[in-house]
Image (cartoon, grey):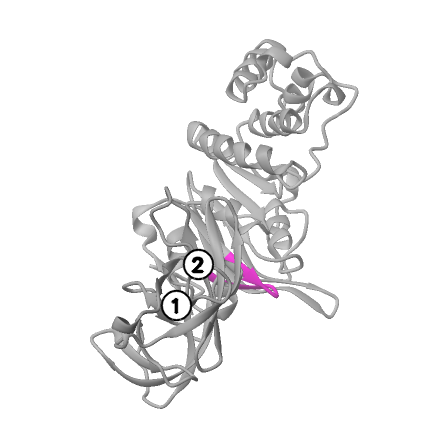
Amino acid sequence: MWVENGSSVDTSQQTAAIEIRNAAKHFGDFVAIRDASLTIFDNEFFTLLGPSGCGKTTLLRLIAGFEDVTEGEIFLYGEEIEQLPPNRRPVNTVFQHYALFPHMTVAENVGFGLLMKGVGKREAALQVRRMLALVKLDALADRRPSQLSGGQQQRAALARAIAPGPKVLLLDEPLSALDLKLRQAMRVELKQLQQETGITFVFVTHDQEEALAMSDRIAVMSDGVIQQIGSAREIYDRPVNRFVANFIGETNLLDITILGEEDGRCRCSLPNGVTVECRTEREVTSGAVGHILIRPERIGLDPESDGSGDRQISGTIEHAVYLGTDTQYAVAVDGGLALRVRRQNGLGTEREFSVGDRVNVRLEEGAVRLLDD
């Protein structure tokens, strides 16, 4: 069992492609990576996620060999590699700006790495055709990069990186230069490509939606520290701290005082005196202060009426924003709290609310979670 920054994974059931143990990277007095430990498994789509400057690209460059570790160890399929130069590591990298050779055709770009490895021309040509078919560019083999769209250039860069058969493919924000519609389409294609090739993908992004849509597991980073590692559902539903809760999706973070705990259910008091129950997986102390997480889509709204006096939380709609698939409400809760609420827009059967409407706030079962810090 290898323990990864608060998340334990049974490595006996899976082959470790990459193991990073207590790695640090210093640039002079600046610490870019602090004591990072993680395991990335064979044939996994693993994402390093975080805001700009958090250290995710630096960690990727440590794996690639473009930067040397200051401390710690890096293993690739059990072989220690931090002393190996980049060209001796069985990894390839796809960068944000695809770096295709402008004077070469698509086919020549894809075959370049194969020829550099000494692969024969006939075998290289067969592999180029396979790769172009895989990324659906076989009809554009004779075009130059300037004659391709952004999405086609990205596919060409992927084919070039995959053609030599790397054990690991590193992708440094490869979708950031594309428009929204194309980014969404390429997410699906990237995931399919990873599954079809069986190559371990390590993907860097600051886009939480990209990470949630494609990843088998995600490492959320901040200030050079891995905050949490888990599946998309684990990261979203069970964030370990306020940073992860705030960074992944929309959220309501509220101050609370703990009143007591029983059978994994914790009773908490909000600043306005309302008592709520929340889920917890740790021991708590009565009287301690902390924070709870409530996702906006897990809050229900009902019209306030004379027959609902037993409800604990009431408020007033302050803002209502129609977003197509759903509507976002800002609710000023009696007692000085504010909540964000999102409701799916259906076929007109749901009650719509307007600014100034009085409502009762209904917390869905299991909607409230106590954070560790």
Amino acid type at image mark 2: Phe
Q: In this view, does 50 lie above or below 190?
A: below
Q: In this view, does 73 lie above or below 174?
A: below
For the stretch drawn in magenta, what is the main secondary structure? Answer: strand
Residue drawn 71% across and 37% down?
Answer: 97
Q: Residues within 10 Å of mark 2 (few under 14, many from 20)?
A: some
In this orientation, does residue 115 appear? no
- Which residue occupies the extreme top position in the image? 122
**Dots 2, 1 in contact, CB < 8 A:** yes
Left/right placement of residue 102 relative to residue 45 reads: right
Amino acid type at image mark 1: Val
Residue 303, given in percent of the width and then of the height, sits at: 35, 64
Residue drawn 57% across and 26% down?
Answer: 164
The secondary element bearing badge 2 is classed as loop
Magenta residues, as a range? 220-228
Q: How crowded is mark 1: few (under 14 residues within 10 Å), some or many (20 or more)?
A: many
Q: Which of 30 and 114 is in front in this view?
A: 30
Left/right placement of residue 325 relative to residue 30 reads: left
Q: How far apart are marks 2 and 1 (CA)?
A: 9 Å
Residue drawn 36% across and 68% down?
Answer: 361
Quarter containing the C terminus: bottom left
In this orientation, does residue 347 appear? yes
Q: In which quarter of the image is residue 41?
A: top left
Disc 1: which residue: 359
Instruction: Tell me the number on the disc at residue 29.
Output: none
Q: Which of 331 and 194 is in front in this view?
A: 331
Disc 2: which residue: 353
